[in-house]
Image (cartoon, rainbow, N blue to C red):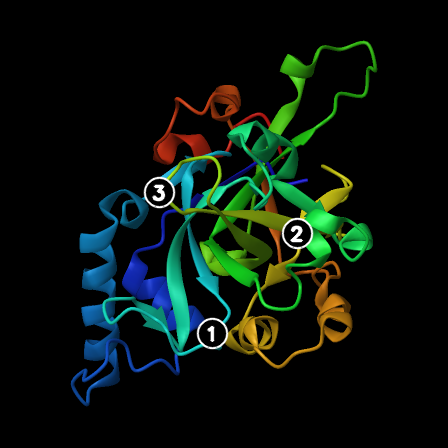
Amino acid sequence: MCGRFTLKTPVIDWLYSLFPDSPGLPDSPANHRSGLELLARAMQRANPLLAAPRYNISPTQPIWGITQSRCDALAPPHELSVCGHPIRMLRWGLIPSWADSTKVAYSMINARSETILEKPSFKNLMHSHRCAIIADGYYEWQRPTDDAASSASKQPYWIHRPEEKPFAMAGLWTENKKVQPNQVLQSATIITTEANADTSQVHDRMPVLLLDPLSISRWLAGDADPEETTSMLVPAKPGVLQIRAVSPQVNSPRHDGQLLIHALSDKP
């Protein structure tokens, strides 16, 4: 599963890395980088919390989600987008349209790729409600070898790309109009798959990673068939991730800051 992640990379840097073909804001200057800088500043003004470095993103908190392009041409004029895909602030933990409480979100922070076309809450979203959730690392907890040990003794690891480069995680999003009257609540889940060789020593699951602009574009393509997109829901190739044992302070969502991803000196 994926229960915590990080996004410390500045907005302009992950935009430039993951969406290099985007011109930025409409009517941006001819300079490509300048156009993305204008977009980044607009995102920072719209959501200062999401634009700040975050080292312990937890369920129920807001996250950046890049969603499939609108098909109805009804996007509001102020809506920010990248490569034609709306940029949304999503609540982590899916709250289906039928739910009348946010409590269900805690059991829907992740969606298993193997059963995603079987679960009613997920399969109906695979056609037009796919999203890419931006991150630059995620946490996983290694179970102690002693089965009798308490859960508090699990060792957390921060899992990331070389040079701590940003990436996206495949997800699904939806809207709910029942929980909060007169307000639309937008939420998302992260899709998981079997762990790859880089991470299996820590945990048997991992998020489905979108590591480059092409894979993100394929996942968000509006004309992609749901059956075809499921072929992308596989473990990342070996050699693309690194693991780092970190402080148990990450166990509490109250803790944040760069110290959370510092390596423990007595761990590999």
Residue drawn at x 68%, y 60% as measured from the top left: 239
Q: Which of pointers 3 and 2 indicates the residue nearer the eye?
A: 3
Which amino acid type corresponds to the residue marked 2 in the rendered image?
Answer: Ile
- Give the quarter of the figure containing the N terminus: top right
Residue hosting label 3? 182
Residue hosting label 1? 69
Residue drawn at x 53%, y 53% as measured from the top left: 174
Q: CA distance from mark 3 to mark 1?
A: 25 Å
Which of the 4 image quadrants contains residue 149?
A: top right
Q: Position of residue 11 (x, y in %)?
A: 30, 59
Camera-side residue of 171 and 194: 171
Q: Position of residue 17 (x, y in %)?
A: 41, 70
Q: Position of residue 133 (x, y in %)?
A: 50, 55
Residue drawn at x 62%, y 54% as measured from the top left: 241
Which amino acid type corresponds to the residue marked 1 in the rendered image?
Answer: Ser
Which amino acid type corresponds to the residue marked 3 in the rendered image?
Answer: Asn
- Dot label at residue 191: 2
Q: Which of pointers 1 and 2 indicates the residue nearer the eye?
A: 1
Q: CA distance from mark 1 to mark 2?
A: 20 Å
